[in-house]
Amino acid sequence: MGSAFSAAQTSSVVGGKQKAVTFNKLMVNTGRDFNPDTGHFRCRIPGAYYFSFSVGKFPGKLLSVILVKNGEEVQAMAYDDYRRIGRKVQSQSVMISLKQMDTVWLLLQQSPQYAVYSTAGPYITFSGYLVYPKLQLISYISNHLSSPALSHLNCPPQADPRSRDPAVEQQRSAFSVARTSTFVGQSGGHQNKLPLTFDVEFVNIGGHFNKTSGLFTCYFPGVYFFAFTVGKHPRKAVSVKLMTGSGQVQAMVFDEDTSKRREMQSQSLMLQLDRGETVWLYSQQDKRYAVYSNQGRYTTFSGFL
């Protein structure tokens, strides 16, 4: 039996005494590893897990929801500091390595200034599933933060580990990375579309992603799922494209608003790749554009076979 869950919350939650986002609608709970009443997922099968969540912004409130592991601040967050009346949805996703009994949940800032909005729609969703069991990492950097930082994405179906062919079992390829610093475009700079680089690595199964160069190189031909989220810099526009080969654009996020507010944009897709093909993110090289991030890890990039 594998491990997967997908849950939703149909009521709004205001920050305060309630620390974890809880859920009142459970669509999938394979293995019963997720408790909607506490909002906690507890790992039963060690391995690499992909998590995604979407949260609605409450009108007139700030939004800050962080994916945490074992009670410590973890790798990624959804954030929007636009206080005015208006509703929107922010999304985030990441893949992390879990040991048996590790716990993962969504943290809402404990202040009435913060809230998440939902209705019977619903706006708030949280999903996760086991991608590769018994993960053997090539490299691993701790995904805990020392102190708190200030769409539901569609995923490919999970394969049953018991049904895998032994010859295919070793063909594992997955990565998940983040940036902890801002990248600002430079007008009149490089003519080549240089990749966005990363400084935090959660998983890198197979070692096929180079965070220093920002390039993922395909070693096993097949269908890959990619997802990325980027933070919008105050007073800057954002334009980030998922590129392949010699610069073909496959997907992008864009926001030309240059107000001082901070928010996020997300995108995901699947690609058929051949051995040797490369995939990377490109941020527009112009001083009007920027990608925002800090220790809260607004900007993330994940992919897996």
Image: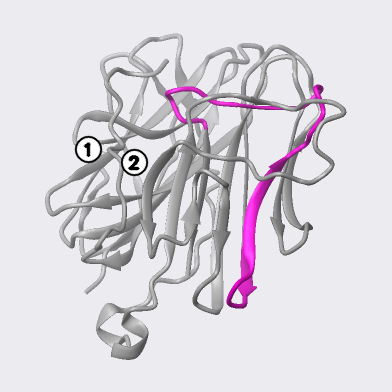
Q: Earlier in the sequence, mark 1 or mark 2?
A: 2
Tell me the element at label 2.
loop
Residue 141: which quarter of the image?
A: top left
Question: Quick one: which residue is furthest to the left in this view?
Answer: 101
Tell me the element at label 1.
loop
Please provide the residue range marked out in magenta. Answer: 270-298
Report how far apart the C-alphas of labels 1 and 2 lie in the structure: 8 Å
Magenta-colored stretch includes residue 15: no
Quarter placement of the N terminus: bottom left
Question: Looking at this view, is 186 or 238 the one in front?
Answer: 186
Residue 84: which quarter of the image?
A: top right
Is residue 104 something that shows in the picture?
A: yes
Q: Is residue 147 above or below residue 304?
A: above
Instruction: Please tell me which residue is depicted at 31% across the width and 67% down the height of the picture.
Output: 132
Q: Is residue 99 above or below residue 245?
A: above
In this figure, which residue is indicated by the disc labeled 2?
23
Q: Is residue 296 above or below residue 97?
A: above
Give the amino acid type for the residue marked by disc 2 in the picture.
Answer: Phe
Q: Is residue 49 left or right of residue 10?
A: left
Is residue 6 something that shows in the picture?
A: no
Residue 148: which quarter of the image?
A: top left
Colour scheme used in the picture? one colour
Q: Residue 93, how many percent across, how many down?
A: 47, 45
In this figure, which residue is indicated by the disc labeled 1?
38
Instruction: Please tell me which residue is depicted at 55% across the width and 58% down the height of the picture.
Output: 216
Report the label total. 2
Question: Looking at this view, is 220 or 128 the one in front?
Answer: 220
Question: Looking at this view, is 281 or 269 the one in front?
Answer: 281
Q: Residue 231, how many percent across, how many down?
A: 60, 29
